[in-house]
Amino acid sequence: MSSATLPPPVPPSGPPSDGWDAVTRVGVVVPSADIGPEAELQCLAPDSVTIHASRIDFGGMLPGGHMVAEKIPQDPITAFVEPPAVDNAVTLLADSPLHALVLGFTSSSYVLGVDGENALYERLAPRTRGIPLTGTARAAVAGFRALGARRVAVVNPPWFDDKLSRQGEEYFEAQGFDVVHHGPVGLPSEQTAITPENLSAWIRTTVAGARPDAVLVAGNGIRAIGTVRGLEAELGFPVLTANQVALWHALHLAGAAAAAARVTDYGRLFRAVPKEA
């Protein structure tokens, strides 16, 4: 068929979206060299939701997004949540007309433990202008409870060492869960080297045998949301990931349950409602 016989293009029914009509706006604090949270949150979010980020210098990564070492030292993890950097980042984000805030950093909750994490949220509360604030570990706890999961598996990024992974186990056990598997995933310690295929293979061969009620792929910088639909269909248990569960929780805290329910490609979590709701 020649171009002369092609039908004319159909004009759009209205002007193209410019993003200003978003019903829900979510802010996220991320490490300076990390691209994972924004990349995944933007893919997860329905059209009515926009994502807005603030960055904090993080000594565990180099410019260009590379890790300083195969395993992240604990000092920069602790420094990430010490004042004043995170306090200022939350304050600046909360200056915007947002509906929920997220701390996109899993390992700080591991190092702080439950009590230390609660103290962090209490310290940041005056900075939020009343905007609800969550983070990966807190959202994961809410997700496990909403799904009725008691026996949980936690898959950590390859840049988490065994000590940090054990701290994660202790964190979730202190929240009342039976951690049937935990550990760093056996993949290259580089955020761009992880794919849905190699991450899925690891979970399939190393984690599924523990027969958890649900699995969490922790770490906001790990490429993970592409594993959710396939693994849930294959393995039969819910798959949670750091950015997936953070957005789910943030939307519910923002009063945007309808927006959360419109997320249909990223797991059964989005059909669940937090217990506190």
Image (cartoon, helix red, strand yellow):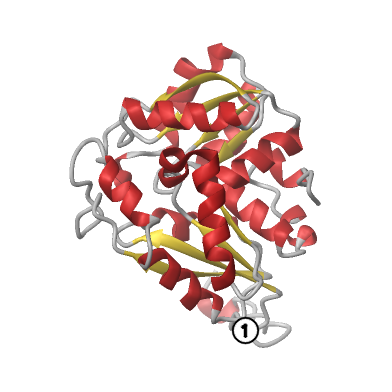
Q: Is residue 21 above or below residue 230?
A: below
Q: Quadrant of residue 81?
A: bottom left
Query: Mark 1 highlights which residue?
Result: 20
Q: Position of residue 236 (x, y in %)?
A: 68, 23
Residue 30 left/right relative to 208: left
Q: Position of residue 265 (x, y in %)?
A: 65, 46
- The residue shown at (58%, 33%) is 230
Q: Find the residue positioned furthest to the bottom.
A: 15
Residue 86 left/right relative to 242: left
- The residue shown at (56%, 31%) is 172
Can residue 237 be seen here? yes
Give the amino acid at mark 1.
Trp
Q: Is residue 100 above or below residue 144?
A: below
Can residue 41 be seen here? no
Q: Find the residue positioned furthest to the top.
A: 209
- The residue shown at (54%, 72%) is 127
Q: Nearer the viewer, residue 49 or 83?
A: 83
Q: Which corner quadrant holds the N terminus?
A: bottom right
Q: Position of residue 235 (x, y in %)?
A: 62, 22
- The residue shown at (69%, 24%) is 150
Secondary structure of residue under mark 1: loop
Q: Nearer the viewer, residue 101 or 201?
A: 101
Residue 149 left/right relative to 19: right
Crowdedness near tag 1: few (<14), some (14–19) or many (≥20) residues, C-alpha within 10 Å? few
Q: Quadrant of residue 98?
A: bottom right
